[in-house]
Image: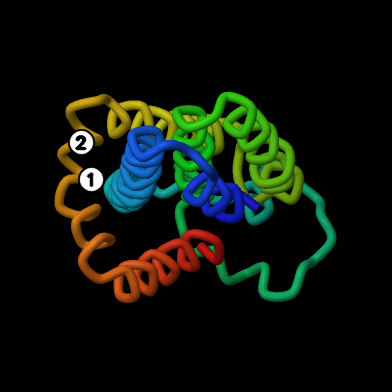
Amino acid sequence: LLVAAFWACWFRPADAAGMQKTREHLLATLWAGIVGIVIARALALELPFRLRPRFDPSIHFHVAALPGSAILMDWSAFPSDHAVLYSALAVGLFFVSLRVGLMATLYVACTICFPRAYLGYHYPTDLLVGMLIGSLCACAFNLHAVRRRLAAPVLPWLRSSPQTFYMALFFLTFQFATM
């Protein structure tokens, strides 16, 4: 849903200057998501391992078994990659549209983060820190000077070769949608 909102904002009608600014924000938001994931993975690998609640026998967390649920047993729970990536997207959408950003943030909290805590894949602090990392990355990358610098080499590619640009952007956003 967040990637669909991204594409809707990308193609929303606007004058040339408005479209340029919107696309700069959206490209900066993609960079924020990528960098946020790199930061989260680095933290997960460097910080002490944190067992996911569903696998920790000391807290007596009971949840129905899900197919393939043991796959994440060897992955540290802190911080949540999902919370990082999708919070970065949601907060980045705030810079394009307050309404879309608010709806995206509610979506992230209710349908991405809450179920991950409810099913025992993360502690609430894993999710809150993940949301904080993603949100800070989105805010930092959407600063005027930063977003202009990030978009400067990409937008000429759109004008010179739209077919390759959109192929690459589709592939990247598909990776975001499927995590």
Q: What element carries label 1?
A: helix
**Which residue is tagged 1?**
151
Tell me the kind of residue under disc 2.
Arg
Q: How far apart are marks 2 and 1 (CA)?
A: 5 Å
Q: In this view, does 173 lie to the left or right of 125?
A: left
Asked if the residue under mark 1 is in contact with the one under mark 2, i.e. CB atoms within 8 Å, the reply is yes
Q: Where is residue 176 in the image (x, y as percent from the top left)?
A: 48, 59
Name the residue located 30 percent from the left edge and 51 percent from the top edge. 38
Local crowd size for mark 1, using a 10 Å CA cut-off: few (<14), some (14–19), many (≥20): some
Describe the colour scheme in one phrase: rainbow
Task: Describe residue 18's horizontal placement relative to residue 45 as left or right.
Answer: right
In this picture, is 73 found above or below 79? below
Residue under circle 2?
148
* Type of the residue with mark 1: Ala
> Would residue 136 appear left or right of 141 to someone viewing this image?
right
Residue displayed at 45% across by 35% down: 92
29 or 46, nearer to the observer: 29
> Residue shown at 55%/61% (left/top)?
177
In terms of depth relative to the viewer, which is nearer, 91 or 9?
Answer: 9
Query: Residue 91 placed where, x, y %?
Result: 49, 32
Residue at (36, 37) in percent of width and height: 25
Q: Quadrant of residue 133?
A: top left
Instruction: Please say whether residue 157 is visible from this viewpoint.
Output: yes
Which residue appears farthest toward the front when viewing the image? 15
In the rendered view, would you say 122 is above or below 97?
Answer: below
Residues packed near mark 2 inside 10 Å, few (<14), some (14 to 19) or many (20 plus): some
**Residue 64 place in picture, x, y as percent:** 84, 61
